């Protein structure tokens, strides 16, 4: 149960603080700063709950772990439920904060309910966005799988690589669709910004497809051959 609780609160903080950096501090830190905030939040979470749940805080990461045999079906389902619920709470808290006098729009859906939602940015197409989500998620999930590999990973330094990876993909992906690579990160803010749902499918299909490719790359290049956890 502790690992599900850790995933719940970890995902909540990811949405609240990382998406909050765009909603509350975007004018002063810009896209580069927002990307770095995503990475720094994940680094902190890796060292806070990594030893409890592995700090997935992302259904795409959990999916990658599942299809490589490093996670049971039961845990996969429990993790995803906890992540979506945590994202919903994080989105609710951010929505409440954004109604306390903040008048700022950074990407996402402009209007009354702007929460750094994942939607196509000006000039981006659906094809461009889904390809971006696939490639960036493939890169990110591959980092997670390889850096945490029991035999060939980097132990206590894995959290740094994972956090830096998330920061990097956000810096690249924010101009396209505010960068998801995480269906839960997209789900939480979208609950309070209905106009974001039209592009939500991209933030599910792209990351999950990217996770599959990451798992293939992991097996081809790292190939730890671990057995499924209980």
Image (cartoon, rainbow, N blue to C red):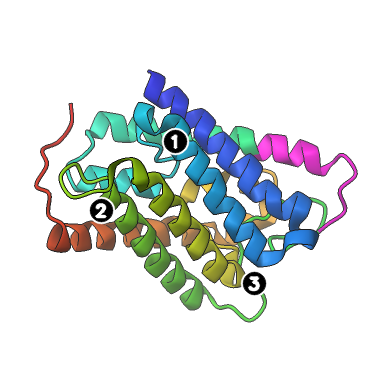
Closest to the observer: 189 or 64?
64
Question: Which residue in the protein does label 1 denote?
Answer: 47
One can see residue 114 in this view: no
Sequence order check, earlier mark of 1 and 2: 1
Residue 24: give x, y in percent of width and height: 77, 50
Q: Are marks 3 and 2 in contact (CB under 8 Å)?
A: no
Determine the CA span between mark 3 and mark 1: 33 Å
State the residue at coordinates (86%, 48%).
102
**What residue span does the magenta drawing correspond to?**
91-104
Residue 202: give x, y in percent of width and height: 48, 62
Nearer the viewer's eye, disc 1 or disc 2?
1
Question: Which residue in the protein does label 2 denote?
Answer: 146
Magenta-span inclusion, residue 57: no
Question: Which residue in the protein does label 3 denote?
Answer: 121
**Left or right of residue 23, residue 119 in this image:** left
Q: Quadrant of the N terminus?
A: top left
Residue 152: give x, y in percent of width and height: 18, 50
Which residue ends up furthest to the bottom in the rendered image?
123
Q: Secondary structure at mark 3?
A: loop
User: In terms of image quadrants, where is residue 137?
Assistant: bottom left
One can see residue 166 in this view: yes
Vertical placement of residue 12 versus 146, above or below: above
Sequence order check, earlier mark of 3 and 1: 1
Nearer the viewer's eye, disc 3 or disc 1?
1
Q: Quadrant of the C terminus?
A: top left
The local crowd at label 3, few if under 14, some if 14 to 19, many if 20 or more residues have their Cα within 10 Å, is: some
């Amino acid at each position: 149960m502790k690992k599900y609780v850790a995933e719940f609160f970890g995902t909540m903080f990811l949405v609240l603080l990382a998406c909050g950096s765009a909603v509350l501090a975007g004018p002063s830190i810009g896209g580069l700063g927002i990307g770095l905030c995503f990475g720094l939040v994940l680094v902190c979470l890796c060292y806070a709950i990594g030893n409890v749940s592995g700090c997935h805080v992302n259904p795409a990461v959990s999916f990658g772990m599942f299809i490589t045999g490093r996670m049971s079906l039961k845990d996969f389902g429990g993790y995803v439920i906890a992540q979506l619920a945590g994202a919903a709470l994080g989105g609710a808290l951010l929505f409440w904060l954004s109604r306390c006098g903040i008048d700022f729009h950074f990407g996402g859906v402009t209007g009354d309910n702007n929460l750094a939602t994942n939607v196509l940015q000006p000039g981006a197409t659906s094809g461009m966005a889904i390809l971006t989500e696939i490639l960036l998620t493939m890169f990110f999930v591959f980092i997670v799988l390889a850096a945490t590999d029991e035999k060939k990973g980097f132990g206590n330094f894995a959290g740094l690589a994972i956090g830096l990876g998330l920061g990097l993909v956000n810096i690249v992906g924010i101009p396209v669709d505010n960068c998801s690579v995480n269906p839960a990160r997209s789900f939480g803010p979208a609950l309070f910004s209905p106009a974001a749902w039209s592009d939500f499918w991209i933030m599910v299909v792209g990351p999950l497809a990217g996770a599959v490719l990451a798992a293939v790359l992991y097996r081809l290049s790292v190939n730890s051959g671990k057995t499924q956890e209980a």
